[in-house]
Amino acid sequence: MTTLLINIKQLLQVRETNVSKVSGADMKQLPMLENAYVYLVDDKIASFGLMADIEIASADTIIDCTNKVVLPTWCDSHTHLVYAGNRAQEFVDRINGLSYEEIANRGGGILNSAKKLQETSEDALFEQSATRLENVMHMGIGAIEIKSGYGLTTEAELKMLRVAKRLKEIYNFPIKTTFLGAHAVPANFKENQDGYMDLVINEMLPKVAEENLAEYVDIFCEKGYFTLEDTERLLQAAQQYKLIPKIHVNQFNAFGGVALGVQYNALSVDHLEELNDEDIQALQGSNTMPVALPSCSYFLSIPYTPARKIIDAGLPIALATDYNPGSTPSGNMNFVVSTACIKMKMTPEEAINAATINGAYAMGLSETHGSITQGKAANLIITKEIESFHVLPYAFGDNCIDKVLINGSVI
Ligand SMILES: N=CN[C@@H](CCC(=O)O)C(=O)O
Ligand SMILES: [Zn+2]
């Protein structure tokens, strides 16, 4: 099957050679072609260029993109999309004055979601999750990472990851999975955190590896959740199963999680709302991608990750949704990109780089996704008629997307 997109007003993120990530001042560069075409053969990008140079005369499908912008689909490298029910009541409780921490201390928060998930059948969990996945695909996501972490028992953690595996099989869409058994300490281990870590390391981890259910390992390294010692124990144990770390650090407190992640070659360190100079130093010269989650900051009214500080230090940054029932009940990368520009002072070029090629890097997909490059997956967003790509973050809350193509087909 061949598809030809013609008369594209701006074709964004064109990379002739394979770039795996962009950092520092380079993030301000978003290579593009004006009045361009893209030619897709089956599920891949076969070629692209200026309309003036087009040599392809026909295709099975021709899409006229006059006055429209085309870009690679968003790469959402941090989600908790498999969950049961919602936490709308906690949302109202927070409006009425309770803090996220107070809710968690009363047994709400992650433990509330874990209870709901344990009581939900695998099929029902699959149905809820599939609906969310289809929804975010229509909002332009073309590759996604999904974590466990709302099970907190061996059985329920495996249930979450099996659901993610089923999604992978059915949707023919890149889904990377992460084992996050150490997301919160369940009530029955309240006085025995070491015992829970034993369960995560000695029982859950081997089973996850045996069933090949995850590529990455995660832990919520935060005061009131898991310590640096817990984190180191887990990352050390995970090495034996070749699970690569992608960890939650510095959401509320900075106490060395970033350096520890870097030490264990984490693919990414995520959240970073609290970030000090030692954290920046630890990231310098490393292969670890810092990931910001602005929708979480928005929803919880906590600080935004200091993107300027990160980029101005010469580092890369990726943007992701953090889609989850507690801190970010939204999987909308368009809102993430807008919010990064509006609240984190990222330029549209930086934000789009962060949400495409750097997002792909943060889930090990930058060889196949995240840019308009010959041979990469034909996963594209075609916008509605807009003046320029700046309108994407500017018109926050608007739906600027006309069509989404996954593997060369309009969904
Ligand atoms: N911070 C840890 N985990 C999720 C939120 C968990 C929840 O509140 O359910 C996050 O990334 O924001
Ligand atoms: Zn998260």
Image (cartoon, helix red, strand yellow):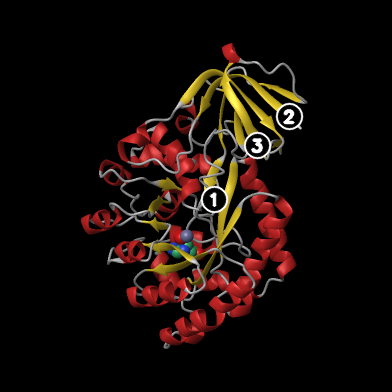
Q: Is residue 49 left or right of residue 327?
A: right
Residue 79 seen from this side: yes
Position above or below: 190 against 211: below
Q: In the image, is 311 to the left or to the right of 388?
A: left
Foreground disc of the pair 1, 2: 2
Rounded to the nearest whole Å, what is the CA distance between mark 1 and mark 3?
A: 29 Å
Q: Tell me which residue sits at (41%, 74%) in the image.
A: 236
Ligand 1 has an atom within 8 Å of the beta carbon of the residue at disc 1: no
Amino acid type at circle 2 is Thr
Q: Give SS at disc 3.
A: strand
Give the alpha-carbon distance from disc 3 to disc 2, as whole Å: 10 Å
Q: Amino acid at mark 3?
A: Lys
Which mark is on residue 330?
1
Residue at 45 percent across and 30 percent down: it is 394
Residue carrying label 3: 44
- Identity of the residue furthest to the top in this view: 52
Say above or below: 44 vs 325.
above
Which tag is nearer the camera, tag 1 or tag 3?
3
Q: Residues within 10 Å of mark 1 (few under 14, many from 20)?
A: many
Using the image, tell me which numbered label, if any, was put on residue 2.
2
- Judge whether 334 appears above or below 147 on screen: above
